[in-house]
Amino acid sequence: MNLKELATRLGLSTTTVSRALNGYPEVNEETRERVMAAAKRHNYRPNARAIRLATGRAMAIGHVITVSSKHEIVNPVFADFIAGAGETYSRRGYDMLLSVVNDADEPRAYRELKSRGTVDGIIVHAPRANDPRIHLLHEIGLPFVVHGRATGAADPYSWLDVNNRRSFRRAAEFLIDLGHRRIALVNGLEFMDFAIRRRAGYEEAMTARGLPLDPALMFSDEMTETYGYSAACRALDQADPPTAFLVSSLIIAIGVRRALEERGLKLGRDVSLITHDDELSYLRNGEDIPIFTATRSSVREAGRQAAEMLIDRIQTPGLPPQQRMLEAELMVGLSTGPAPTRG
Amino acid sequence: MNLKELATRLGLSTTTVSRALNGYPEVNEETRERVMAAAKRHNYRPNARAIRLATGRAMAIGHVITVSSKHEIVNPVFADFIAGAGETYSRRGYDMLLSVVNDADEPRAYRELKSRGTVDGIIVHAPRANDPRIHLLHEIGLPFVVHGRATGAADPYSWLDVNNRRSFRRAAEFLIDLGHRRIALVNGLEFMDFAIRRRAGYEEAMTARGLPLDPALMFSDEMTETYGYSAACRALDQADPPTAFLVSSLIIAIGVRRALEERGLKLGRDVSLITHDDELSYLRNGEDIPIFTATRSSVREAGRQAAEMLIDRIQTPGLPPQQRMLEAELMVGLSTGPAPTRG
DNA sequence: AATCATTTCCAAACCGCTTTGGGTAGCCCA
DNA sequence: TGGGCTACCCAAAGCGGTTTGGAAATGATT
């Protein structure tokens, strides 16, 4: 059943039927009701392809997810962000388009998305420092919102981010207040913007309290369980091991825990740990009381909001760049305690 | 730059230009080269919306991901499956469309996808026993491939699955061979097809060796870390605790490990554990030697292949239903050892 | 030289909507 | 009674491609 059939069946022109269905004012209320009823009765759904061509809008948002040929990691945060964004899209009538591209092809992918007109806008994931995508997207004129920020980007742009610096500073201060002096940082890859900011927060707290920054206690890599494990091993097997860990993800924390247990060290007593918790749905940090003390911020909610921001930008062009900062909560759990007194 | 502009610039009709670009034979080779060169020079990209309307094909595959209002879990396996499927899609010129819908709306979502013509086919995720989606998709006539199977489905359908029953039977036998008699099963939700089959494999092995099936050792729930932990606690705190665990995911295994360590039990010595490992990119089971002994099968590869199967079905209609069974490898790691002799 | 098949190209229809630019009927008012 | 409004509806022209059904030119055949 298409528009033309529906129109003939009603004895009306397609114009009128189209207008009736789309709520335009130049159609009699009575007629509109007739049309609506017939549409429902015949289960009429306008053809999305035709609408897209006629209106020139794609009614779709692109998410480009890159897999590098070296480390083929799919960001574990991705699924939940997508789920959140997807909720917004369905509510506002947009489709979500996912492109999996090799990172070398990313610029080309964006250009094609624009020139072929498959999407109206883009969410930029996992920004790095001086991320070239921001300039690129400005250049090709595709609306976008960045999930995170990109230190050093020249042009202004829209973003939604967690206050990584503040939350890691706060977490480090919390550990320092508990008496910890040697605090290890097990961070993500430090060309990623979030990792840069978290490190800055950690360093700020340390230096503000007059504590030294020991490179032997600072780690940076892809955030896997085995990385958490091996970083913790290296840290703990030093002459002067840390009494606390500040880590960038729950998965890292789990790896650290494995290293601790291997050494008979008890979390929260012998060694303290604070992690960032993105509230991934399949990796909850305990039920009521958190297993790990954590800086918590829902990435799913971030997805919802970022999508909302992007659609707003698409629907009202010329909107000035918009920013939104989410604050992470510090949830005290079982993994932190006073620094052990030297025996 | 659109087709018409390109055509006038070349002094040709749009027909000829279109044919030249799409490799039709009725155009002079010389002309074709001229057209190709001009297209490249002007960076011409055909408008995807127009192609879709003209050809009647969406050139897109739908993935419907459901979030239930009760347990809002995004399947952690999802991201990697998508990444694999996405590779296939880019290679074969398809877009990937993601719909996040509440599970109550799922049938409606499929119907709309069909009647609005947004996709050419669908990948069905996380099938349950007697999954109604299979009949529904047959009814509305949308090509699909199921990732997994659906015990009890009446109509024949295409699927790609891991041999869950066999791999869990084999894993259980391995534990029995090591002398274990009380083996706990920590499974996923047992209305999910994969969980049903894994349980069947486990039960087969146990009864084949004359071992009793103890309901107190069989657990079933959403596969989270805390579930693994609490199931293990309940199992271990029994009068006659198990000496081995057979669990359905690495995340569960991590929870079990936490419970063990809390009790001072050493994995691989006091208690053995085998898990299924989907080879999620952010949750590798160790580098060289697996941390956990595991039945291993790459879900990313499954994504690649399922996508390939679906596109084949779309491009050659009338193809009989096709099935592909992947065998999981049993990787012996550090988490299994001979059953401890009773002190 | 006439006939016929091939090769190469084109005009126009079509995909299924939206939107522009009227047209007509009914009503009000002078 | 006629002019001007308003309310309601429609035909037709897009949107940017693909595809159908020729037509013209060329070459081969008789």
Image (spheres, coloured by chain):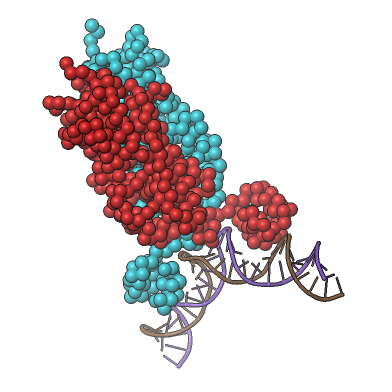
Chain colours: A cyan, B red, C brown, D purple
Rendered position, B93 above or below A297: below
Q: Position of residue B247 (x, y in %)?
A: 28, 32
**Quadrant of the image for the C terminus of chain A?**
top left
Give residue B47's quadrant in the image: bottom right
Judge by depth and name the residue closer to the eye, B218 or D17: B218
The structure residue drawn at horizontal position 18% and vertical position 18%, both measured from the top left corner, is: B342
Q: Position of residue B202 (x, y in %)?
A: 27, 35
Looking at the image, which residue sits at the far top?
A343
| Count of residue discs | 0
Looking at the image, which residue sits at the far left?
B239
Judge by depth and name the residue closer to the eye, A135 or D5: A135
- Residue B5 in sight: no
The structure residue drawn at horizontal position 31% and vertical position 18%, both measured from the top left corner, is: A259
Judge by depth and name the residue closer to the eye, C20 or A338: A338
The structure residue drawn at horizontal position 34% and vertical position 54%, both measured from the top left corner, is: B134
Give residue A221's quadrant in the image: top left
Rendered position, B189 above or below B171: below
Q: Position of residue B32 (x, y in %)?
A: 69, 53
- Residue B77 in sight: yes
Rendered position, B286 above or below A44: above
Image-based side of B264 in relation to B155, left or right: left
Q: Position of residue A32 (x, y in %)?
A: 35, 72
Give residue B112's quadrant in the image: bottom left
The structure residue drawn at horizontal position 27% and vertical position 20%, both measured from the top left corner, is: B338
Judge by depth and name the residue closer to the eye, A178 or B50: B50
**Quadrant of the image for the N terminus of chain A?**
bottom left
